[in-house]
Amino acid sequence: MKQRRPRLDIEIGNDFAELPRLHAAARDFLQAAQVDEMTRFAVLFALEELVSNIIRYAYDDQFRHPIQVHFEQAAGSIEVEVVDDGRPFNPCPHPPPDTGLPPEKRPVGGLGIFLARELTQEMHYQRENNLNRVRLSFSGLAR
């Protein structure tokens, strides 16, 4: 009999007030999956950046939109998928910000997504059925 992989599915609205609930659920899942501290940090940071950007930039209206987050413990890794119905946005190909410029001369934005990409082993984007799907892979399980 095939053993089921630990999984968590959570849906929040596009509201910053819902981020603490997402963070708590993700933290609890990662602790139960025995993910090491550095990987927990990477997952939580990348998730916060992606979901914050969705809330801030993906919608042109004031209606509630669902943001689904799926966590799965795979062999030696944690897989996270973020799904939203906002405007299309692929975070994968954007160039890194020029950190050599003084802060006052840098364009606003881009650093969080860059750091999130750097913290993952893999990041993939797909637009399917009017949904953005960003899949992140992290290694670092304690076992």
Image (cartoon, rainbow, N blue to C red):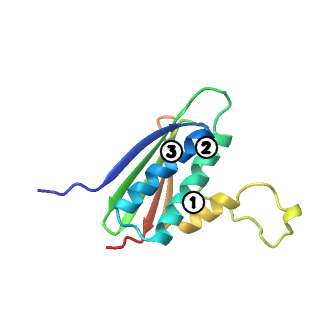
Q: Nearer the viewer, residue 61 or 42?
A: 42
What label sits on residue 79 in the rendered view? none
The residue carrying mark 1 is 45
Per the model, the C-alpha gap separating discs 2 and 3 is 16 Å
Q: Where is residue 106 in the image (x, y as percent from the top left)?
A: 83, 62
Label 2: how many Cα within 10 Å (few below 14, some 14–19, many 20+) = many
Q: Nearer the viewer, residue 128 or 107?
A: 107
The residue carrying mark 2 is 54
Q: Residue at x 55, y 40 (%)?
A: 18
Q: Residue at x 79, y 55 (%)?
A: 108
Contact, mark 3 vs mark 1 (Cβ under 8 Å)? no
Tell me the amino acid under the disc marked 3. Answer: Arg
Residue 89 in sight: no
The residue carrying mark 3 is 21
Secondary structure under tag 1 reads helix
Residue 5 in sight: yes
Mark nearest the camera among 3 and 1 is 3
For the view shown, which residue lies furthest in the left direction?
A: 1
Tell me the amino acid under the disc marked 1. Answer: Phe
Position of the C terminus by quadrant:
bottom left
Secondary structure under tag 3 reads helix
Contact, mark 2 vs mark 3 (Cβ under 8 Å)? no
Q: Where is residue 86 in the image (x, y as percent from the top left)?
A: 59, 37
Looking at the image, residue 1 sits to the left or right of residue 125; the answer is: left
